[in-house]
Amino acid sequence: MAFSLSRMTVLAAMLASAGAAQAATDITFWHSMEGPLGERVDAIAQAFNASQSDYVVHPVYKGAYGESMNAGIAAFRAGNAPDILQVFEVGTATMMYAKGAIKPVQELSEKVGDPIDPKDFLGAVAGYYSSPQGKLVSMPFNSSTPVLYYNKDAFKKAGLNPDAPPKTWPEVADAAKKLRAAGMECGYSTAWPSWVLLENFAAWHNVPYASKDNGFGGLDARLLLDSPLFKKHITFLADMAKAGEFTYGGRGDAGNALFTSGKCGMYTGSSGMRASVIKTGQFAFGTSTLPYYPDVKGAPQNSIIGGASLWVFSGKSDATYKGVIKFFKYLSNPEQSAAWHQGTGYVPVTKAGYELTKKSGFYDKNPGTEVAVQQLNADTTANSRGIRLGYLPQIRDIEDATMEQIFAGKMAPEAGLKKMTTEGNALLQRFEKSVK
């Protein structure tokens, strides 16, 4: 049977297409983004795959952050690790010191001839995921930071100016007192107590959370919570709790409903909570910066991030590594960075993404959405760069459990801080021995 010229042309094109598809390098990406966020990750991967023909990224949801990190490490030990693994920020030290398991991102990008420059990222974001030498060890992806949300309707009812949120802790206490007097069930509460009230508190006031530059300077870092400013702060909050002006809302983001339900007038929570407030809250609200103590020199400095970054496992082919870096460069281009920020509530991790969002008028149309970026967009110090400690999730558990006792009036703040420091440092000593 003779083929017509047109049929031969079509066949040749199909064969060429099949050959190109076979030549494409597959890249496996394990992540913890579920629901709408997972859909966005899938869409980003599809758009990247459509933008070129050399690489195909396959995103796979692997459960919550802790589950996916454990799965990734187990897979590496079994010899079948994914190429990219999303890891929450508190797992940074664990991944860094997993000997032979990971390829530092900046070093890898330079090796494949497609450098990633940490200067392209917001200072506090790049700093958190960089080595002591200032080189990126993982790729910044979804970053958030805590901000102060406040109920404007409740402020009006309490005789407070809805356009002048409290900026200092004494102002928070004063506003909480007036909110309670006006009938609010709760004056002030917070999400993520350890992250907000200890880690970010330290960075925002430019004081150390731990020695050795919060762990960036070595494995022998130890907690410094048993210090005058932490004692002042935890005592201040304990006094507010005793007076009924501060309500402990639970660990993690368990307290979010206190604010979204309208029970609480002020709330410190993740910048990524904004969409939930808009969807659930039946009131006008504002967003402001974290409170600080005005008598502390150098405050406010900058907040630190939550969220996660992307890690690259070792033992992969050169073609895979080139594709991974190409995907990372795609993720961090201004358009992608801006779209991720505007669509999710996470901050734009790159400076160009921030500037593009600003230029588009997004912040003017959505007041309060710039606060998180402004808090992070600063030159960091040794105290405000972030936290680089092993067993940080377990340390947070100790801190949260102890603060629960303090705010319930069952433990003195000074004794509680000593307990956190002693028990946390015991964990740090264990971590130091485990990686040497």
Image (spheres, rainbow, N blue to C red):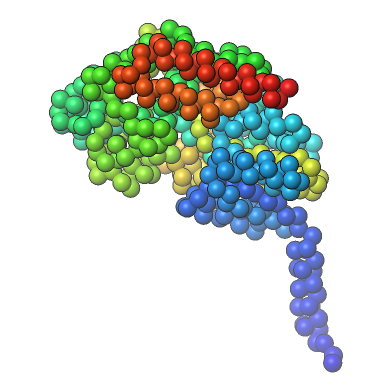
> 237 or 203, which lies in front?
237
Above or below — where is 188 with respect to 282?
above
Vertical order, 372 against 74 (above or below)? above
Residue 375: x and y in percent read 45, 26
Q: Is residue 16 positioned above or below 202 on the image?
A: below
The structure residue drawn at horizontal position 32% and vertical position 14%, both measured from the top left corner, is 236
Q: Within the image, what quadrant is residue 216 found in?
A: top right
Residue 195 visible from this viewpoint: yes
Q: Position of residue 306 (x, y in %)?
A: 50, 33
What's the residue at 78%, 78% (across, down)?
11
Q: Residue at x 71, y 25 (%)?
A: 435
Spot occupied by residue 190 in the image (x, y as percentages of width and height):
36, 29
Residue 347 is left or right of residue 410, and the answer is: right
Vertical comparison of 70 with 244: above or below: below
The image quadrant where one finds the C terminus is: top right
Residue 44 screen position, x and y as percent: 58, 52
Q: Split into 4 quadrants, where in the image is the N terminus?
A: bottom right
Question: Looking at the rendering, which quadrant does residue 392 occupy?
Answer: top right
Label count reads 0
Say whether residue 332 is left or right of residue 97.
left
**Residue 326 is at least partly visible in this image:** no
The residue most toward the front is 410
Q: Residue at x 63, y 28 (%)?
A: 93
Horizontal side of residue 321 vs 366, given as left or right: right
Position of residue 28 in the picture relative to residue 272 (left or right): right
Work out which residue is located at the far bottom of the displayed protein and give it.
Answer: 1
Instruction: From the viewer's side, name the closer residue of 141 and 241.
Output: 241
